[in-house]
């Protein structure tokens, strides 16, 4: 639980975490602690680490960041659930006869109740944020299907409580999507975590209509419509953090299927380092982004993290002295001080027409959610040519293919050569869980992989070791936690500009890029394998090794 607004304000302003003006703006936006904090977070005036450190200092105790040292089922079991929930405490670790206990309510901790569970050890308290405590408490929870049964048996508000439980679980597991999939005899609930779907629970079909209506009402959909697709959105606030959810519904032969996309704070807070860019590539993209005009493209299939990369870049560029406008379908990440325009086909607000209007709005930086057609491509290139920095995504298998495809869409080669600065291709891979990572011989990692081992082994020495995850409570026994991206950068150098003027093939562009030092996505994957970021199997899942020895 957070202190009241005035207490938080005094702590943050007195210790210079925020200014008095920022605090007044937050107070105007909301009069409770959760809303006050949420405003500061959304305006990027504060982050969780700084908030936790500030509150911990006020209590004169250390800050326990439970995202760095996650709580496991083994740790949570050290303190009985009734005591933990009543006193808002979790066991963190023990060393040198000291048991570290984290709490968000130091005044409510009764040491005598806790000491008996740690005989011979001295209790040392640390402060942590309420949302970290709540996430840890989820480890006490029974399986989702069991909780469904308990809600159905004991609650008068079945639908709202079931929806709440599902969303809370999804946030705990850092899911990107929730799937409600009606079958003949029930409804499967699945979460997409780190790009992979996993079973979460099953819901009796007789209760699904009420759950569905609850989702429709909260999302602003029509509850009397069952035969057409619908889209909506809703928000949830928990522990002072707001989560936006985009909701999509389509009718199937077994009923209406729902997918909820979670746009949690753990996505919105990404920066260029978080998404897997090394320092060389970060410096490169920052150099191009600092130019007053030109085009930066991210390419890859759906779900490869293109928009996340561009928003990480926007986060860097978002300054008081620049006007940033985006046009997207849909607007996924809300960003303070950025003018975000939603495509609406029904009202004839297309990418092309919206972009024409945006150019007349005196922007410095424009983000186009996706270049889908020749008209949008032409307007984008002209905008980049006439004094705007333009960022966009483009569907292309690799960076080299993007350039011939844009020419095929009707962009004159001389215009493309003059405006395009860099093309970034990317794919997402799962990261090895840091809590259960261990080393294995390369030969073991190659076992069972359908690949010519000679194409892999020449990247490693004879006694090479790579890494894998054993599976633990932190990663839900998958061995993976979080995702990173594999990148390829193609810079439009003077030599590349000359080549583009000749309407080159993909192979010609690839050859010149390789000559100029461009690293392929597979090569970037090898670097991340050696660094223990991901596994060989993960890299091979998303990119192919080169046909010939590099």
Image (spheres, grey):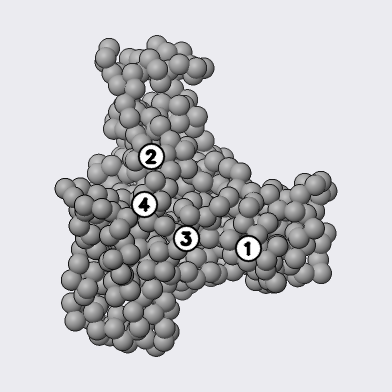
Give the distance between the C-alpha atoms of the residues marked 2 and 3, in whole angstroms. Answer: 20 Å
Give the image location of residue 146, x and y in percent. Answer: 63, 52
Disc 2 vs disc 3: which is toward the camera?
2
Depth-wise, is mark 1 or mark 3 nearer the camera?
1
Q: Position of residue 328 (x, y in %)?
A: 54, 61
Q: CA distance from mark 2 to mark 1?
A: 29 Å
Q: Secondary structure at mark 3?
A: loop
Q: Give the answer, above or below, for where 129 lies relative to 431.
A: below
Relative to 338, say whether 74 is above or below. Answer: above
Image quarter of residue 206: bottom right
Question: Which numbered disc, 2 or 4, marks the residue closer to the eye?
Answer: 4
The residue lying toward the viewer, choosing from 458 and 406, is: 458
Residue assigned mark 3: 264
Name the residue beneath numbered marker 4.
Answer: 78
Side of 475 where 145 appears, left or right:
right
The residue that disc 2 covers is 433
Asked if the residue at tag 1 contacts the one at tag 2, i.e. Cβ–Cβ closer than 8 Å, the answer is no
């Amino acid at each position: 639980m957070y202190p009241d607004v005035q207490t938080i304000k005094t702590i943050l302003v007195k210790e210079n975490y925020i200014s008095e003006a920022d605090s007044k703006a937050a107070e105007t936006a909301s009069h409770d602690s959760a809303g006050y904090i949420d405003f500061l977070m959304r305006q990027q005036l504060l982050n969780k680490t700084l908030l936790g450190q500030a509150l911990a200092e006020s209590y004169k105790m250390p800050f326990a960041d439970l995202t760095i040292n996650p709580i496991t089922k083994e740790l949570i079991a050290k303190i009985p659930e009734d005591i933990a929930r009543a006193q808002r405490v979790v066991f963190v670790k023990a060393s040198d006869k000291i048991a570290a206990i984290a709490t968000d309510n130091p005044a409510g901790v009764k040491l005598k109740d806790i000491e008996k569970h740690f005989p011979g050890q001295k209790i040392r308290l640390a402060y942590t944020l309420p949302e970290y405590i709540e996430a840890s408490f989820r480890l006490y929870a029974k399986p989702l299907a069991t909780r469904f049964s308990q809600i159905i048996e004991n609650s008068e508000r079945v639908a709202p409580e079931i929806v709440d439980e599902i969303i809370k679980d999804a946030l705990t597991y850092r899911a990107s999507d929730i799937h409600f999939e009606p079958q003949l005899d029930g409804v499967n609930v699945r979460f997409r975590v780190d790009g992979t779907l996993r079973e979460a629970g099953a819901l009796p079909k007789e209760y699904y209509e009420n759950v569905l209506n609850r989702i429709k009402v909260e999302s602003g959909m029509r509850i009397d419509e069952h035969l057409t697709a619908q889209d909506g959105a809703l928000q949830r606030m928990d522990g002072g953090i707001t989560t936006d959810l985009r909701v999509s519904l389509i009718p199937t032969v077994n009923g209406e299927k729902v997918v909820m996309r979670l746009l949690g704070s753990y996505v919105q807070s990404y920066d260029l380092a978080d998404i897997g860019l090394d320092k060389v590539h970060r410096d490169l993209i920052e150099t191009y982004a600092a130019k007053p005009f030109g085009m930066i493209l991210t390419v890859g299939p759906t779900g490869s993290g293109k928009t996340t990369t561009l928003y990480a870049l926007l986060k860097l560029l978002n300054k008081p002295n620049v006007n940033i406008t985006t046009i997207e379908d849909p607007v996924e990440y809300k960003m303070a001080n950025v003018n975000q325009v939603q495509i609406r086909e029904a009202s004839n607000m297309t990418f092309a027409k919206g972009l024409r209007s945006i150019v007349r709005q005196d922007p410095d930086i424009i983000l186009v959610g996706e270049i889908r057609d020749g008209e949008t491509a032409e307007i984008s290139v002209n905008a980049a040519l006439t004094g705007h920095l333009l960022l966009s995504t483009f569907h292309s298998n690799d960076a080299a293919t993007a350039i011939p495809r844009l020419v095929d869409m009707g962009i004159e080669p001389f215009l493309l050569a003059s405006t395009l600065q860099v093309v970034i291709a990317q794919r997402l891979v799962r990261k090895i869980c840091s809590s259960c990572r261990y080393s294995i011989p390369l030969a073991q990692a190659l076992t069972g992989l359908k690949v010519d081992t000679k194409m892999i082994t020449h990247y490693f020495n004879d006694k090479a070791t790579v890494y894998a995850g054993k599976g633990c409570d932190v990663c839900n026994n998958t061995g993976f936690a979080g995702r990173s991206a594999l990148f390829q950068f193609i810079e439009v150098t003077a030599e590349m500009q000359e080549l583009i003027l000749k309407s080159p093939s993909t192979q010609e562009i690839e050859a010149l890029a390789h000559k100029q030092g461009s690293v392929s996505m597979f090569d970037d994957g090898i670097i991340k394998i050696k660094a223990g970021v991901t596994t060989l199997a993960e890299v091979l899942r998303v990119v192919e090794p080169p046909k010939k020895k590099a």
